[in-house]
Amino acid sequence: MDKIELFNRLAVVVRPAFSDFQPITTLEIPLAETGLDSMDALTYSIYLDDIYGVSNDVSKDWTFLTPKDMFDLYEAHATKHPATVEEAMENVQ
């Protein structure tokens, strides 16, 4: 699955009025430079909890520095493994 595409598509859902959003091109970008604020990041993690089947207890205290950090944690604790971005976004409203 293309994690950059998933990050970008989910960012638009998390912050639909995100007019200054510039899609990321690398997973190594600092989260602080993505334009997502702390509330956006919380909402983002709730979606990823569902997408990857990860308990909120696992993700709630993690401090992510980059999208790569975030995806590494979710993949390490995943109980669901979406094969495509479309599959991952299937239940995202």
Image (cartoon, helix red, strand yellow):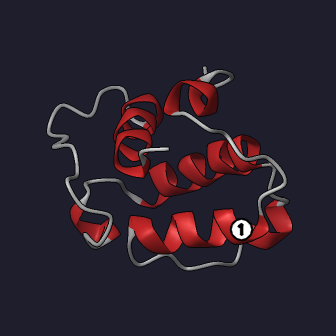
Viewer-closest of 88 and 48: 88
At a point 33% along the width and 67% down the height, the residue shown is 31
Quarter that holds the C terminus = top right
Q: How many marks?
A: 1
Q: According to the image, label 1 marks what residue?
A: 59
- Say left or right for 16 vs 83: left
- Say left or right for 11 vs 26: right
Task: Give the class, few, some or many, for how many residues have Cα within 10 Å of label 1's Cα (few <14, many ≥20).
Answer: some
Q: Give the x, y percent position of residue 24.
A: 22, 51
The amino acid type of the residue labelled 1 equals Ser
Q: Give the x, y percent position of residue 68.
A: 43, 69
Q: Give the x, y percent position of residue 85.
A: 51, 33
Q: In which quarter of the image is residue 5?
A: top left
Q: Give the x, y percent position of residue 45.
A: 61, 54
At a point 62% along the width and 27% down the height, the residue shown is 87
Tell me if residue 9 comes above or below residue 73 in the rendering. above
Tell me if residue 87 comes above or below residue 49 in the rendering. above
At a point 25% along the width and 69% down the height, the residue shown is 29
Tell me if residue 26 comes above or below residue 83 in the rendering. below
Q: Quadrant of residue 61?
A: bottom right
Viewer-closest of 36 and 74: 74
Which element is circle 1 on? helix
Tell me if residue 22 comes above or below residue 79 in the rendering. above
- Say left or right for 87 vs 5: right
